[in-house]
Structures are given as structure tokens and as C-alpha cells.
Image (cartoon, helix red, strand yellow):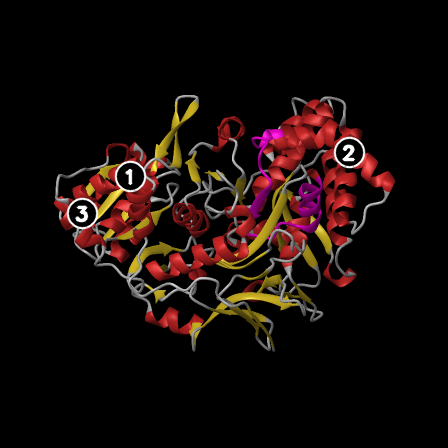
Amino acid sequence: MREYSVPAKVTIVDSANLTGTLFSRAAEEPNRVVLRRKDGAGWRDVTAREFADEVAGVAKGLIAAGVEPGDRVAIMSRTRYEWTIADYAIWTAGGIAVPIYETSSASQVEWILGDSGAKAVFVEADDHEKAVESVRERLPELAHVWRIDALPTGEGSDEDLAERRESRAAADLATIIYTSGTTGRPKGCELTHGNLLATARNVAEGALTEVFGIHDGSTLLFLPLAHVFARLIEVGFVETGLILGHTPDVTNIVDDLGSFQPTFLLAVPRVFEKVYIGAEQKAIADGKGRIFRIAADTAIAYSRAESPGLGLRLKHALFDRLVYGKLRAAVGGHVTHAVSGGAALGERLGHFFDGVGISILEGYGLTETTAPIAVNMPGGNRIGTVGKPIPGTTVRIADDGEVLAKGPNVFVGYWHNEEASKQCLEDGWFHTGDVGELDGDGYLKITGRKKEIIVTTAGKNVAPAPLEDRLRAHPLVSQCLVVGDGRKFIGCLVTLDPEALEQWKQQHGKTSLSIAEAVKDPDVIKEIDAAVADANSTVSHAEAIKKYRLLDVDFTQESGHLTPTLKVKRNLVERDFAAEIEALYA
């Protein structure tokens, strides 16, 4: 058993809640810009006073509608300015916010609203409202359905509002976040005001001080605010007074990043993979594919080198003008750091961006730990790990390799599910279900999922994640699933990336190739053969993929095979593609 602890930088007093900083800043620094909201093709500054006034108005509207302290109010919307207003208004009214992914089905909406006992829900679009109305007769506690672009407001007194919001303390529930879940029904994670405050402040003032300490620092949120990762950043920016922006449409993310010009980014690994693949494909289309590959190899070598030699420094300087500067400009030109979480990033990709001049700080955590358990820090970024425990957190590796965590970030338990709570919480330790290693300096490395370890008939234990991460790094690969539990060898299902395939077809003069034809095309197969060989080069012969099958459909959220954070729902893919898996072993 190995254990590593980092002392807390910030301790939260019992009386603290999430609205304190918002209103105290409005009183002390009313003209400080704390948000920017979309205004046509540009952005409009929102001051601390304007933000607080808008939150207060909506909170009064909630109180007038009958929302009492401890009542649950749901939000079903894409990431947008009004999401943060609604979130803080719910807390100001003493309520508990319940986020719902905007891609959720009617049955998922019914489960979350019913299980949480929500009194009201904010929805963004017609289909969201239809999903709620279709199940409303089975939700007797749901009294209000509001559109998020027409937030309710009220005229109550400021004194009554202050009394209401100050009635909430650190130990009170702030939110119930339902895990997107790769198996079974989502469980509601109970997070308190103290959980969010302690985690946000210890990250901002302890782990990522350089990121949050930038003068006029800013970020543009595009990850779903229904996810704990984006939600914590929302709280962190309000707590530190940095500038927060929102964009709901990732199809315009490049234009939005260019106009917003953030200093800090937050994303899941697939976003960084897409940025790399897009840049590579554009270079190939422009006849500069060889130059890009040399530039990429140079960036990686530069990042890996402890002390780059003169030749490497000169090459790096040349490509900084030719290639790297354009990549930095594509994300606004001011980004120095990005935090990646939700899945493994991959060392090659981490070194590439580091060499380009954007340090990706990989972290690790779960909804149950208010997002981060560990994160890499500027000046101490050990690529290939998920960093050290955040201040206030202790990480322990159990005898069976499972990662355990203890600290003020660990949740209270699952809403209305005492049995599930007892299964994962023991003497304050949260059992993550992930398998990992701690080195002597306290850096954590995640090596697999405890329940996803594949055991072949030869008795070989194989963690699928490293193979899958490496495979997805190939431009043509969209998703993949390594299989082989109880089988003679390791196999894999692979899907093609539709956007990358279109570019590939143009480059290879096969524009009429359908997806059904592409999965049988010798040149496509040659590309995937190379990707599989590359993935296999990172593992032993017994762990290597022996056979794979290319599918003519992709795994998507719409098909039900991906979670909103783009994790593959392993059990559902194995069920729906059972015939294809069997064919691997026929």
C-alpha cells in the first residue's frame, strides 16, 4: 500500500457558501469585469455588480415562485451565460441545483427529475420542453417549467434575499449531479457548498496558482456545464474574479476562441486530439504533410528533452514561426495552459502541445470527488501522469491497486441510495474503481479501470484504456473498443471518423467511396493496420490486438454508445455489436 498527501492551502469555514464571494465582490469591486457574454459576433463585458444584480433578480423570482431552502431546481441546457446566472440564482435562493445533460432522453429526464424531486426546471429548447412535458404527469412535485432565455425575476427585498442566501452553510447541499454512467441508471452525487468551495479554492490557490493568477485571466467554457469538470471551473472563476465566457456551439469554437482570446482552456482529450488531427489534415491537403510531421516530431522531441541541444533549438524556433504560431493563433493566441480531464490524454499528444507552447495539465477525478483528485501543475508537469493530489487531498493505492481518495472534495454520498454510498465510501475513503500507481514524488498514474480489466483464457490481465487511447490518436479512427475477456486473444472494434474520412477520400482520389465501402477498402485497412501496429508497440505480445473489425457506423451520443463526456459505454457496445465481436473469434 502506498499513500501520498498534500496539505490544504485553504480551509473553508462552516458558515461559508457559494454566494458569498459573488456578492462581496459586487460591493467591493462593482466595476470589475467578471464575465463576457456573446453579443452578435463579439463579446460584451459583464461587471461584478451587473452579475450580482442579475443573479439576485432571478433568485427573487424563484422565491416568489415558491422555491424554499433545500428545494431542487433542475437546469437542462447547453453551456451558456444564462446557465451560470440560473446556477447562482438557485444557490442564492437557498435551493439545490440539479444539472441535466441537454442530450438526455425523455426517460433519463424523467428519472433525474423524479429521483431528485425537482420542484422546477429550466429548459433551453423546444425538444427539452417536450421531453419534460411528455413525462410531467408522472412528476407530481414538478411545479414549474421555465425557458432559460426568459429567466423569472422578482421584486422582493434585498434584506430578505440576504437572509435567505446566508441561511446556507458549507455542509448544505449545493448540487446533485447525476453521473452520466456507462452502466445502469445514473446515481445522484451529493455535493455540498463546502465541497465546491474547498476544491475550487485549493485548486486556484494551491495547484494551479500560475493559471488562476494571470492578470485579466479568462477562459471560454464549451464543455457541458452539466458535467462536474466545467461546473468546478465556473465556481473557480467566480471565486477568483477571473473572466468567464460561455459558448454553446462547438461547431463555431475556432471563431469564438479567436474573438474571445482566452488565457486558459478546459477540455476533454478528444478535443485536443481533434485539434491535432485537424491541423495535420489541413497541412496534408495543402501539400505540407511532410513538413507538419517533421514539425510535430520536433515539438515532441523538444518537450521530452531536459536540455535541448542547439540543433533542436534551431529547428524548434523555425517551426515555431512556420507551424506552432498558427496553432496557438487557432485557439485565440493567448492560451498558455490547458487542463485536460475525463479520460487519458496520451503522452505523445501531451508532449506535442507542450512543444507547441501550450502546456496541457492532465488531471484526474470523478463526479464523486468534485472533479479533481490530482492534477499536474505548471512548472511540475510530468506528462504521462495525472499529477499530484490537489491540496487537502490524500491518495492511497490499495493492495489490489485501486485508487482511493480522502479530502474535502469527496462527496457526501448518493442521493436516496444508501447502499451504493456504503459500497464506495469507507472511513472517509472514496473507492474510485480505477487502478493506478503512485511514484515516490506523489505523481499518480491511472493504469486502468478495475472492472474493465480484461483477463484472457491464458490468464493475462490487460487494461484496454492504453491501447484504445493510442488507437484513437490516428486521424481516421473515431472510436474503438478493446475486447477479449475470457477469450484466447485480444480483439478490437474500430470506427472511422467521418470528417477525417472525407479529407482522406479527397487526398486519395476516392471521393465516391461510401462508409460501407471504406471499411473494406485496402488503403483504409492499410491505415488502420498501421494504427493497430503502433498501439501494439506499446504493450507486450500477450496484450497486443491480434484481430480487429472495422464498423460502418460510429459510436455516438445519439446512438446511446457514448456518454456526454465521450466515454464509450462498454456494456452497450458489447451488447449491440455482439455478432461483430463473435466474428473476431470465429
Find out whether residue 351 is within the magenta segment.
yes
Q: Which residue is mark 1?
A: 123
Q: Mark 1, residues whose alpha carbon is within 10 Å: few (<14), some, or many (≥20)? A: many
Three-letter amino acid code at the position of disc 1: Val
The x, y position of residue 520, in whole percent, is: 69, 36
Three-letter amino acid code at the position of disc 3: Glu
The x, y position of residue 231, in whole percent, is: 41, 48
Specify the quadrant that holds the C terminus.
bottom right
- Label number found at residue 317: 2
Residue at x 48%, y 65% (from the top left corner) = 8
Does residue 585 show up?
no
Looking at the rendered structure, the secondary structure element under dot 3 is: helix
Three-letter amino acid code at the position of disc 2: Ala
Does residue 155 show up?
yes
Tell me the magenta residue range: 329-355
Q: Which residue is mark 3?
A: 137
Looking at the rendered structure, the secondary structure element under dot 2 is: helix
Q: Mark 3, residues whose alpha carbon is within 10 Å: few (<14), some, or many (≥20)? A: few
Q: CA distance from mark 1 to mark 3?
A: 17 Å
